[in-house]
Every structure is written in C-alpha cells, then in structure tokens.
Amino acid sequence: MPATIYRHSILVLLLVMLTALSAPAQQADAENCNLCHSLALLGIATPSDGLRSFEVTAEAYSHSTHRNVICRDCHTDINVFPHPEEVATVECYKACHITKPFALTGYSHAEQADAHAISAHGFNSEYSAEKNEAKPDCKYCHSNTFRNIIKDEVLESNSQHCARCHEGDGLAGVILHVSSHSGHRTAEASIDVVELCSSCHADQGHMKQFDVNLTQVSGYERHFHGKALKRGMNEVANCMDCHRNHLNLPADDPNSSIHPNNIQQTCSSNAYCHSDATAKFAVSAIHSEPTTQNNPILFFVEWGFIILTAGTMALLFAHIFLDFGRWVGDIWMRRKEK
C-alpha cells in the first residue's frame, strides 16, 4: 500500500473514531464543530494573550442552555476551515435564530444586555480600560455550573406534554432552564450563586479599586440568610434575589431594588421570602459588620453579650474545676486517714 494512501486511511480511521466518541455532542452540534473542539487541550499560544484554550467538552456543551443553538449562530464570522487567526468577539445581545416559547417573535438577549450595561457591572466611561475589564461580563457568570440546565426526570417528563402543542426542539430545555431558577429552587444552586459573587466581592485587592464596601460577604454569612443557607435551607435569599441578576444598581439609585424606597417591596417580592415584610423590618441590616464608627450601639451590645457569655462559661468551668478538686482532695484525705 502506498505511503500516501496508508496515511490517508489512518486519518480517516481517526476521524471516524473521534466522531463515534463525540456522538452525544453531535446530536446538538449540526456542523460537527465539536469534532475538533472537544479534543483535550485544544488551543494556541500567542505572545500577547499567552495560552488560549478552544476546548469545549461534549458534556458541557450537551448540557448547556445553548446546546440547541448552532455554533455559527453566535460565531457569525467563522465561515471557513481552518478558521482565521483573528475572529470577532461574540456579542450576547445579538438576535438569535430561535423564537420565544409560546410566541412567534424573535428572541435575543438584548433586554438583559441593556440592563447589564447600565448596572454596577456595566461599562463606566469614567473608568480606565483595565478597570472596566475587571468587571464581570456575561460569560463570567453564565459559564458557571449553576447556570447549566438541571437534570430532573419529573420536569423532563412534564415538558413532553407541553411539546405536543408547542412545537420546537428547544422548548423542553427552556422549561428546564426556567424551572431550575424559579420554582425548582435548591440550596446548592444558591450556594453557587453566593460563591460566584464572592469570587469578586470577597477579594479585597480586587474590590478596593472600585471603592466598594468590603464587608458584604462576611456580613451576609454572619446574618440569618447566610447561616440558613449553609444549613441547607432551600428557600433562602441569595445575592441575586435582592440585588437582581442583570439590573443590579447601586443603593443610591432610585431604580435600584435595594434603594430605601424599594427595599420593602424587594423583601416581599418572592413567595419564599417575607411576604408580609413591614417598613421597619425591611431596613434591618443584612450585610453589616458593626464597628464603633458605623454602629457603636450594636457593636458594644454584641461584644457585651460575647463577654457575658465567655465570663459565664469561665465561671462555670472554674466552679466545676474547683468542685472536682475538692472531690479529689476528699478522696485523698480519706485514704490518708486509713
């Protein structure tokens, strides 16, 4: 067999094997992009960007919200293979090819992108390019595991009834995606949300450049919501329940969900929250780390209870120790008398 034919045969055999191994991803990958992009460590190294990974695992792709979206619906400038060295950045606000469930209108993420643009995480013309790049973009949050569709047999079977009338292969996925972030609420998902937000807000070096209070995470963890969430309670407010996921505005913005005029409505907005929250209840501290400057009364009351508790326990253990010593002494004296 000629060497050229032999090499081509080996190449064809390898491609067939790769196709078989990536079969689960192929179901959602109409253009076979994952034939290459599912290869481990696929990427390039450039002097400016360093190592850039282009690996997309079949597991991540087939279980993501976008598993029914063709790759080139987002990567619109990629029309040839091999791909050009420079490709356009994917913009999440572009119109998609799918239609909204139960409607005939086109779908896009424009509403979410517009909200993010004016939020605290959006672009600020007064900031430097480096400072704006330090803010979280769409992929920073949506590439996390809690944003993937949660596998649930009951939800999957129920969604089949909807698909009998409402056509569309992606409908079942939409139902699962929406349900996993609303009624199908778990403590694990909320913990993931808190950990995601904490990855920036608990980093003092990262947050100092934005002149942001650095006690949000520790304040949340020391109050009811954080403690209840760690104990596995499902219906506990996480960061996005109060601050919103896209339109998270500063507290001094009148349109903010945590503005003094809106905080009562925010506390009572969800069925699993405080539906009967009063105005006085709504102004209670959630993230506070009391100090002698911002809340001296609470600071000294808290430390007063700590000292009182520690002092009481110290006296209790001292009494037990002395009583134990007297008991040992009595036994020693009785043996000595004998």
Image (tube, rainbow, N blue to C red):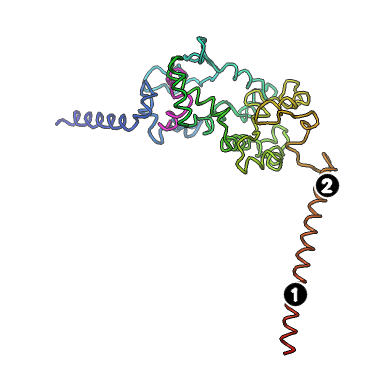
Which quadrant of the figure has residue 290?
top right
Q: Is residue 211 left or right of residue 19?
A: right
Give whichever of 21, 177 is nearer the camera: 177
* Classed neighbour count for the residue bearing mark 1: other residues with Cα under 10 Å, few (<14), some (14–19), many (≥20): few
Q: Is residue 208 magenta?
A: no
**Circle 2: residue type:** Val
Q: Residue at x 45, y 20 (%)?
A: 161
x and y percentages locating residue 98 in the rendered image:
47, 15
**Above or below, comparing residue 219 to residue 277 in the picture:** below
Amino acid type shown at disc 1: Gly
Vertical side of 36 occupied by 70: above or below: above
Give the secondary structure at mark 1.
helix
Residue 70, position as x, y percentages in the image: 42, 20
The residue lying at 85 percent from left, 43 percent from top is: 297
Residue at (32%, 33%) from the top-left corner?
21
Residues shaded magenta: 55-73
Check whether the beta carbons of the residues at disc 2 and disc 1 lie within 8 A of each other: no
User: In the picture, which quadrant includes the N terminus?
Assistant: top left
Residue 35 in which image quadrant: top left
Tell me the residue that label 1 is attached to.
325
Q: Nearer the viewer, mark 2 or mark 1?
A: 1
Q: Which residue carries the number 2 mark?
A: 301
Secondary structure beneath label 2:
helix
State the image quarter where residue 224 is shown.
Answer: top right
